[in-house]
Image: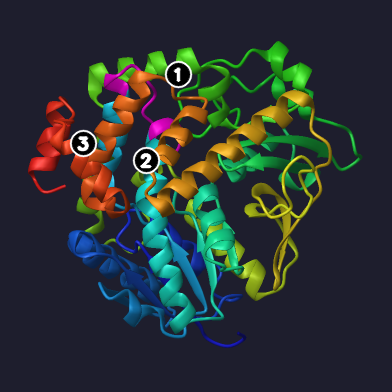
């Protein structure tokens, strides 16, 4: 692989792409990139062209002779790629709006990667990822796939276990945010702390030690409800009960609020929905603002406004992971990879999100060891839910989809859950060909969301 590098980014028209480019520019001396291909679909063509022009201006301003290509032809881009990054959203933000609005109308959580919304994002994404892997096997069989398409852990599991692409690492920005913020909370340098993470994507815990081996976890627990305690900006900061966390003696990730504080998080989501729309609708406004900024011909750097988008440091994490592989760095990173015994209560082949050492051979997970009964129970049921979701996404089996809903802790089982499942199937019919037969039956039975916004999206071609 040594020599000039070819990078392909699928979902290249994303508003996150300038951060990706910035990360590569900052690492150019250790990552001699020759060309970057940004790939998108027809619906994202305008954004792709805007981002592509900005990306080329950024490279030119940095003084490096790197060529940025934009294309709607994935196969053209993938030929002889060294690294492929995935950051796409099937159905764009309109799909996320539907994922959030329909459950909320039924009094259940609507969220991008948790609950019903997360399940349906996986249903739409896994078949597309299957086609991407098929192309990679033919066109760039030695490439590494660095995935941060959500739900990242589920998608990474499908890629590795179902599609047989072993050279894949899944990423998330949440552990990185914790590792950046927590030293500041303690008034210490990042190099003075050691973090260890274990769990699943958006469902992990971690512990922290200083260089003398002193456990700093409980000190950090005392600060977890503070503004800069490590919670990502896009998660409502309902207060964790500190007694619970001290008993656990673990730091939960921000997304655990949806599980430990389900009622409070749901109430906030419903209130936000009533007053100003869903998170997806807010992000659509932010994204529109960003693309206006990106069109400025004098702009040659990542704009500060990108921080409002909510996924800060995703792209920079991807760049660091690529550098760690290319340069055989032996870097500590928190990634989704094969368990290999790191979490003893899960299968060795399961995909987990754990502290790992990243080298030229990929991710080597660091053993966490035995989990307490509570955390073991949580992680096992969440892994079972992920596996059911993947099976349903591939088979189009309605009963399997209903089972994934039933086992999901954030979906109240029963008639209401089935109605949400049916409405989401009909609303997302365009992107769920594996469920065509069932969707046709549901339409004949008159199933449709009564939400005016959802109906309008569908009528306008979503």
Q: Which residue is mark 1?
A: 265
Q: How far across and down, in percent of the image, does residue 431 sit?
A: 26, 52
Mark 2 residue crowding within 10 angstroms, few (<14) / some (14–19) / many (20+):
some
Q: Residue at x 20, y 40 (%)?
A: 441
Q: Position of residue 456 (x, y in %)?
A: 10, 36
- The quadrant of the picture occupied by the N terminus is bottom right
Is 238 in front, or is 453?
453
Tags 1 and 3 touching, CB below 8 Å:
no
In this rendering, is residue 32 above or below 121? below
Looking at the image, residue 316 sits to the left or right of residue 184; the answer is left
Q: Residue at x 75, y 65 (%)?
A: 330
Residue with the mark numbered 3:
442
Instruction: State which mark lies toward you, 1 or 3.
Output: 3
The segment highlighted magenta reads: 104-116
Q: Residues within 10 Å of mark 3 (few under 14, many from 20)?
A: some
Residue at x-position 71% and y-position 19%: 245
The residue carrying mark 2 is: 398
């Amino acid at each position: 692989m040594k020599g000039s590098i070819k990078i392909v980014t699928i979902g290249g028209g994303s508003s996150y792409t300038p951060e990706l480019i910035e990360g590569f520019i900052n690492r150019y001396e250790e990552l001699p990139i020759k060309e970057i291909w940004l790939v998108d679909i027809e619906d994202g063509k305008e954004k792709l062209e805007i981002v592509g022009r900005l990306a080329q201006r950024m490279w030119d301003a940095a003084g490096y002779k790197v060529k940025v290509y934009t294309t709607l032809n994935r196969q053209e881009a993938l030929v002889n790629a060294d690294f492929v990054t995935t950051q796409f959203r099937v159905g764009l933000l309109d799909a996320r709006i539907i994922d959030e609005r329909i459950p909320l109308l039924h009094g259940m959580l609507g969220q991008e990667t948790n609950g019903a919304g997360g399940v349906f994002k996986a249903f739409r994404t896994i078949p597309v990822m299957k086609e991407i892997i098929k192309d990679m096997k033919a066109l760039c069989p030695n490439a590494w796939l660095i995935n941060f398409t959500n739900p990242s852990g589920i998608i990474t599991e499908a890629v590795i276990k179902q599609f047989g692409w072993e050279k894949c690492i899944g990423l998330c920005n949440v552990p990185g945010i914790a590792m950046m913020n927590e030293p500041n909370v303690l008034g210490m340098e990042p190099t003075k702390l050691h973090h260890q993470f274990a769990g699943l994507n958006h469902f992990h815990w971690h512990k922290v030690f200083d260089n003398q081996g002193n456990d700093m976890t409980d000190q950090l627990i005392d600060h977890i409800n503070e503004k800069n305690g490590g919670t990502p900006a896009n998660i409502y900061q309902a207060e964790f009960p500190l007694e619970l966390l001290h008993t656990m003696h673990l730091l939960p990730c921000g997304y655990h609020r949806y599980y430990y504080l389900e009622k409070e998080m749901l109430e906030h989501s419903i209130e936000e929905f009533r007053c100003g729309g869903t998170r997806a609708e807010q992000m659509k406004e932010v994204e529109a603002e960003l693309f206006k900024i990106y069109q400025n011909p004098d702009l040659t750097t990542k704009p500060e406004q990108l921080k409002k988008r909510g996924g800060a440091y995703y792209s920079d994490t991807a760049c660091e992971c690529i550098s760690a592989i290319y340069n055989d760095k032996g870097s500590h990173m928190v990634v989704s990879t094969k368990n290999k015994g790191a979490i003893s209560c899960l299968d060795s082949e399961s995909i987990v999100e754990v502290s790992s050492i990243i080298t030229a051979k990929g991710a080597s997970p660091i053993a966490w060891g035995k989990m307490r009964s509570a955390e073991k129970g949580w992680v096992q049921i969440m892994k079972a839910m992920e596996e059911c979701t993947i099976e349903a996404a591939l088979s189009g089996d309605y009963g399997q989809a209903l089972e994934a809903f039933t086992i999901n802790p954030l979906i109240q089982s029963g008639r209401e859950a089935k109605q949400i499942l049916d409405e989401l199937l009909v609303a997302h019919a365009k992107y769920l060909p594996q469920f065509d037969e069932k969707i046709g039956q549901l339409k004949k039975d008159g199933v449709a969301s009564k939400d005016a916004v959802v109906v309008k999206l569908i009528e306008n071609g979503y």
